[in-house]
Image (cartoon, helix red, strand yellow):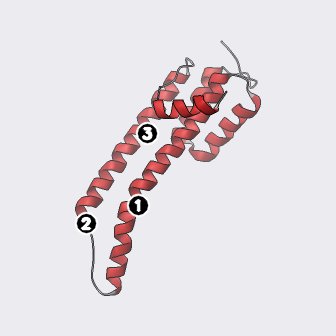
Amino acid sequence: MQKTKLGISVGLLGAAICFSGLFGGYLVTTILAGYVLLFEENVWLKKTGIKVIALMFSFSLLGAIIGLLPNGIGIIDSVFNIFGGTFSINFITRIVALTNDVLNFIQIVVFVLLGIKAFSQGTLRIPVVDNIINKYFD
């Protein structure tokens, strides 16, 4: 079993990065991934750190894009409120809420599977993210 410079196994540190992507937020995950990129030599571990950060960014970006629609409706409603009216499209708001719930569920499943597979230095193949990482990471 390969060890890191911290004295723990590579798989355990990889799993910690994956689970921190789900539970720890950007700060903890970035610190762990940054440590791995700067001080560790294991290529799988470095790719895992980059993958987790890229997935976190991707899920946040998708959530922000999906959230644009209700924000736009809210702006229109604010303009209508100035003149004493209201504007809402409840059907779209419910669809956006469902889409956000599905996206959050997928995010949880992806990070849990990544974390579980990381214990044995495995990975969950996500073609778009993996292709980008393989293209720009030697």
Of labels 1 and 2, earlier in sequence is: 1
Find numbered disc 3 in the image and state the secondary structure of the residue it sits on.
Answer: helix
Residue under label 3: 107
Residue 25 image offset from top left, x and y in percent = 57, 45
Q: How far apart are labels 3 and 1 at the CA level?
A: 19 Å
Q: Residue at 47%, 45% (x, y): give it.
A: 59
Q: Which mark is residue 115?
A: none
Total numbered labels placed on residues in the image? 3
Q: How far apart are labels 2 and 3 at the CA level?
A: 27 Å
Q: Residue furthest front?
A: 135
**Circle 2 residues within 10 Å: few <14, some 14–19, many ≥20:** few
Q: Residue furthest bottom?
A: 83
Could you tell me which quadrant the C terminus lies in?
A: top right
Residue under label 1: 68
Q: How far apart are labels 1 and 2 at the CA level?
A: 14 Å
Could you tell me which quadrant the N terminus lies in?
A: top right
Residue under label 2: 89
Find numbered disc 1 in the image and state the secondary structure of the residue it sits on.
Answer: helix
Residue kind at label 3, given as amino acid type: Gln
Can residue 17 be seen from the camera position used here?
no
The picture quadrant where one finds residue 66 is bottom left
Residue 36 image offset from top left, x and y in percent = 70, 31
Residues tagged 1 and 2 counted as in contact (Cβ below 8 A): no
Residue kind at label 2, given as amino acid type: Ile
Residue 7 image offset from top left, x and y in percent = 73, 21
Of labels 3 and 1, earlier in sequence is: 1
